[in-house]
Amino acid sequence: MTQNKEAPKSGSILVVGGGISGLTTTLEAAEVGYEVFLVEKNSFLGGRVSQLNQYFPKLCPPTCGLEINFRRVKDNPNIKVFTKAEVEKVDGTPGNYNVTIKLSPRYVNEKCTVCGNCVEACPVERKNGFNFDMDSTKAIYKANDMAFPSRYAIDSSVCKGSDCNKCVDACKYGAIELDMETKTLEINVGAVVWATGWSPYDATKIDNLGYDMHQNIVTNMMMERMAAPGGPTNGKILLPSDNSEPTSVGFVQCAGSRDENHLPYCSYICCMASLKQATYIRAQYPDADIYIFYIDVRAPGKRYEKFYNDIKADEKVYLIKGKVAEVNEVDGGKIELVAENAVTGEKVRQVVDMAVLATGMQPNAALNKLPADLVYNEDGFIVNDFDKGGMFAAGCANKPADVVSSNQNATGMALKAIQTLVNR
Amino acid sequence: MAEKLVVEPDLGFIKEMAGLGGDTLKKCFQCATCSVVCPIAPETQPFPRKEMIAASWGLKDKLVGDMDIWLCHNCGDCTTMCPRGAKPGEVLGAIRSYAIQDYAAPKAVGKMVNNPKMLPILFLIPSILFLIVGFAYKAAGINWLNFSPGGEIIAHYKFFNTWLVDSIFVPTMLGMNLILAYGVYRFICDIHKNALAAGKVEDKPFDPKDLVTSLINVVVRIMRHDKFSECGENKERATAHMMVLFGFIGLFVVTGTVFIGLYVFGVHGPLSQINPLKWIGNIGGLMLIIGSLLMVKNRLTKTDQTSSYQDWYLIGMVFMLGFSGMLTQMTRLAGGEGVTYVVYFIHLQLVWMFIAFLPYTKIAHLVYRTAAMVYADYMGRGFK
């Protein structure tokens, strides 16, 4: 490697995806002096982490970490952020990639002060995907409380455009431009880091767990939103059927993970996520019964193991070794979870007010192939080819990982990208 | 579990499982999905999760004497839903196959019968037996084996005299039944012992009336194929299985009636084609052929189902019994004298093989499964 000392054509790095991994790679590379283009398809940075109520195991909110990162991004002149942007094409070789980026219109410019007058004026509602459609927003919306850039955006799929024009009239700052158009941007970079993240596995595909048949079955990511202060229930965990308070909650681990019929791999985070969510429920309902049905509880490392042991000490948290393979609705909306307790060898039919499916993570690259010459494993995660170099995957684009591992991995990929640029 | 359990794995057993179609058992990670999705497993100590770990640990004795392996009807729902491709349904099939051979004495015969390489020899055994016995009678001056039967009507008894056939078949039948009875006796002792130890059932004083009731319950259930229709995945097997079962029952009735007709009333075959017994026999034969062909089709289309030599042996045997039987009749009616005697000879060899090797082959499930189901019904191990 030391033989080839030819200077690369471009000294810049492209980071695709503005979640926790992409932010980390961006900052680590930019803060040692490299120019970084950060491309994010949403109207805000922060990705999946911004949807969480709390991180495990420290149980601090995602503002902790994200806010400081946003601040660092804002203050660093080496970083160019593009939101509502998607990479359309990547051509070239390590050290010299020509990238086409599509910039979709936000319809709201930087004059926006987030005063909210436009929202009041807007007559159109849309389902709020950020809250997994559990509530709705106006067509002009701010994705979440800590959205960065802190600006409104318009959902063009529902907005009536200049025929309506009510938001434009309501805005005192001239921040709304309904005639904003899609743009294309061409840049040249020396290295690309793909931090395209993950999506929760589609629970409707798991037929025997009845997600779309029973109202009081939610996914773990929905639970995060319900527990989050800015969520659809303002942080209160309530039954979807009638907004009443649950007295018992059952967690169904490995919902679609470690299953050849769905995701064959372990999604790594769901055990810890459910244990963490048990603390959400306990905090709001001191007497609630919490049932966790598992194959194996995977709480790796000293800190996670301690967290697990703390949860186990709760007398009203029942851990049952046996995968839930059948659900039924009983007593008008209650959920019966059926499993075999593999320790006692008896069939368990546990009735709970609400069931949480601990769905796993599927790489976004598996759902939508990326426009670049990348190698994927059979599950759709990007395989890092360090011999070839030039393009790398960070965080959950590369493997199922928690926030800590994603950050470590993302830091490593920043270094790999820099090594490509300096040709070592 | 309070008592100390020392696991003594039978490695040979685990290896043999693979040959019997249970090669996937090591993939199991004990999630227990199978026990939940099984449409017929009982609520207490459902199968097949516990059988999967016992198989993985090589606990042979625990498994061959486990009634639950026979309560399983290989619906295949567990195999479809298994997150690991461990195919519990197939593994239980392999355990059953092993259990049959384990209870059938002498084991050397079982080994031979279940070895595909020995198949030609198996086929030669009845041929040699027939000829030896036939010539032995000839030497004693009794001409029951006639290589040039002649005569105006073709009648199979002129070639192989019925006395010759029956003097071979009756002892074969009796011997087979003794071997089977010995196996089933040990089997019932074992499942009772294991079920008590596992707490699946509670001991109770013997009640013959209850036993008869259970027997009737189970026979009705088997005739109606209740368990098959409770299956999710493999439902369509019921038709094929029903055809073969009722085909055999029909043929058994015909054979029994003809036997009585001959020895009690002196009525000799061949029967008239419009005789109702002939109809039953023909329908039975056709049912064997169609049923076995349906089984072949089902097995070939269901790619996640493993088919072992034992499965193919039985299906092949059923088909050949029906086919050679029908062919015997057709060649006789067509007047092909030489041909029909050869075909009849082959048919007789197959029937002998079928009966003599019954305790060692998959067809023995007829008695083991019935015994286990009656036991479960009698002891009150409800299976849904």
Image: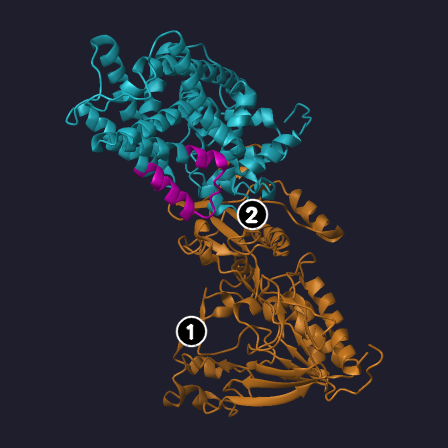
Chain colours: A orange, B cyan
Cα–Cα span, label 1 and label 2: 40 Å
Horizontal arrangement in the rendering, residue A43 relative to residue B145 (left or right): right
Q: Residue at x 62, y 34 (%)?
A: B14
Q: What residue type is labelled 2?
A: Arg
Q: Give the range drawn in magenta.
A: B290-314
- Image quadrant where one finds the N terminus of chain B: top right
A104, B51: nearer the viewer: B51
Q: Dot 1: what SS?
A: strand
Q: Mark 1 points at which residue?
A: A126
Tell me the subunit letter for badge 1: A
Labels 1 and 2 positioned on one and the same chain: no
B221, A109: nearer the viewer: B221
Magenta stretch: includes residue A205: no
Q: Mark 2 points at which residue?
A: B84
A128, B225: nearer the viewer: B225
Q: Position of residue A308 (x, y in %)?
A: 68, 48
